[in-house]
């Protein structure tokens, strides 16, 4: 029954993730945390993400913006390695609080989805963003939709946002899983949990892709903002309590 529930949770989380530009991992955090100890939630969720991402990359391959990937990935790999060494030692509640407040402010920045841009974004900004976001994702198992405002301000909507974000996350995720494996965190049982979530994510990606084709850009932006508010609220709650 636990396997079935986690599989279905993976399907639902990644359908939502596809339709709102991300956030599937943060939806999985409380579900995985209910069954497993807090110390292994981040590795299991990141492993599930890794297994599900190749399917999404194949589905959205033609929309990947490689000129952004080349700025993001090198520093993201470094962030994943550093995060892997410190994730069991750092008291990082303040990081979650700061990120939560940032995400909660985004609906006002974009005027509830009606405004296309809220600040001027350059590709070079993805270098420090790659390091910080990858480090935080390694520590917590998810960053919610922290990068979404930056993708939106680069003009990446719907398929282009999802494709580019997935390519960045997949390559950085290889380094994340490598860090966990080096630390001896991933045992056989955790690989099984991650596989179940990943299989659910694959199905969710396929369903989400079909639904996304019928979605307008305005509704997509609104969906992105909604998931940012949910992610921000969860991060703020976790950071405070």
Image (cartoon, helix red, strand yellow):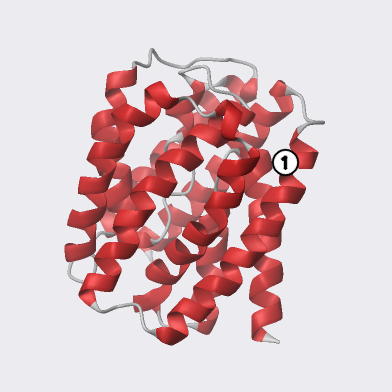
- Residue 199 image offset from top left, x and y in percent: 63, 66
At x 31% / y 48%, what residue is drawn?
A: 134
> Is 17 on the left-hand or right-hand side of 69?
right
Q: Is residue 67 above or below residue 238?
A: above
Can the viewer see residue 38 in this picture? Answer: yes
In depth, the one of 123 and 41 nearer the eye is: 123
Crowding at mark 1 (Cα within 10 Å: few <14, some 14-19, many 20+): some
- Residue 82 image offset from top left, x and y in percent: 17, 55
At x 63% / y 30%, what residue is drawn?
A: 159
> Is 117 on the left-hand or right-hand side of 124?
right
- Residue 173 image offset from top left, x and y in percent: 38, 54
- Residue identifier under label 1: 209
Q: Is residue 241 above or below residue 204?
A: below
Identify the secondary structure beneath mark 1: helix
> Is 66 on the left-hand or right-hand side of 23?
left
At x 58% / y 38%, what residue is drawn?
A: 21
Name which quarter of the figure residue 12 lies in. Answer: bottom right
The quarter of the picture where the C terminus appears is: bottom left
The quarter of the picture where the N terminus appears is: bottom right
Q: Is residue 93 above or below residue 188?
A: above
Name which quarter of the figure residue 188 lies in. Answer: bottom left
């Amino acid at each position: 029954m636990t396997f079935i529930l986690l599989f279905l949770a993976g399907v639902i989380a990644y359908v939502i993730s596809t339709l709102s530009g991300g956030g599937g991992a943060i939806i999985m955090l409380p579900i995985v945390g209910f069954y497993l100890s807090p110390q292994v939630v981040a590795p299991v969720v990141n492993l599930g993400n890794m297994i599900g991402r190749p399917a999404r990359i194949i589905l959205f391959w033609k929309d990947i913006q490689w000129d952004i990937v080349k700025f993001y990935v090198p520093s993201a790999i470094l962030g994943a390695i550093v995060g892997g060494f410190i994730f069991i030692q750092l008291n990082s509640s303040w990081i979650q609080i700061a990120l939560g407040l940032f995400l909660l402010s985004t609906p006002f920045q974009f005027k509830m989805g009606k405004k296309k841009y809220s600040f001027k974004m350059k590709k070079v900004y993805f270098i420090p963003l790659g390091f910080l976001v990858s480090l935080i994702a390694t520590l917590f198992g998810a960053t919610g939709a922290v990068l979404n405002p930056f993708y939106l301000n680069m003009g990446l909507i719907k398929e282009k946002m999802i494709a580019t974000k997935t390519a960045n996350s997949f390559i950085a995720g290889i380094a994340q899983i490598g860090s966990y494996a080096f630390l001896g965190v991933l045992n056989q049982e955790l690989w099984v949990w991650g596989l179940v979530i990943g299989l659910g994510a694959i199905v969710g990606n396929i369903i989400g892709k079909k639904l996304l084709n019928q979605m307008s850009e305005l509704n997509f932006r609104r969906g992105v903002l909604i998931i940012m508010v949910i992610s921000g609220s969860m991060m703020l709650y976790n950071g405070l309590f």
